[in-house]
Amino acid sequence: MLHDKAQQKIPIWLRTHRKKQKLSQIEAAQKLGHKSAALLSRWEKGVATPNLINICKLILLYNVSFEELFYDVLEEVREKFPELTENRQITSNNTIYE
């Protein structure tokens, strides 16, 4: 489980990146294909976390990488599981399908 510190930063980063794109919650929600801003509001308040599809949409909408959007979460996972990054053979130029 993630520490509260990393979990608390997710809403901040979501809100920050939306505002960098100069989008209101309603505008962002509409671009994401949602009828209202309720779900986006819940993400930005930390009440809910976006699912994988919505994370992908947010990455595209905010023009950021996963690491930029969820930096603290990724860093915490790297610290907890250093063995996952040992012997790294896949680079950003390679895909798992090669």
Image (cartoon, rainbow, N blue to C red):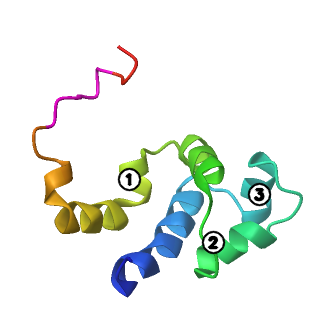
Q: Position of residue 25 (x, y in %)?
A: 73, 65
Name the residue beneath numbered marker 2. 43
Residue at 23% across / 29% down in the picture? 90
Residue at 89% across / 58% down in the picture? 35
In the rendered image, which quarter contains the C terminus? top left
Residue interval drawn in magenta: 88-94
Q: Nearer the viewer, residue 76 or 65?
A: 76
Labels 3 & 1 near each other (Cβ < 8 A): no
Q: Is residue 84 above or below residue 6?
A: above
Query: Which of disc 1 and disc 2 is earlier in sequence?
Result: 2
Mark 3 and mark 1: Cα distance apart in space: 20 Å
Q: Position of residue 10 (x, y in %)?
A: 47, 71
Q: Is residue 86 left or right of residue 73?
A: left
- Mark seen at residue 68: 1
At mark 2, the secondary structure is: helix
Question: Would you say the magenta stretch is mainly helix, strand or loop?
Answer: loop
Q: Amino acid at mark 2?
A: Trp
- Mark seen at residue 9: none
Q: Is residue 18 left or right of residue 25?
A: left
Mark 3 and mark 2: Cα distance apart in space: 11 Å
Residue at 64% across / 47% down in the picture? 53
| Mark 1 crowdedness (10 Å alpha carbons): few <14, some 14-19, many ≥20 | few
Name the residue beneath numbered marker 3. 29
Q: Amino acid at mark 3?
A: Ala
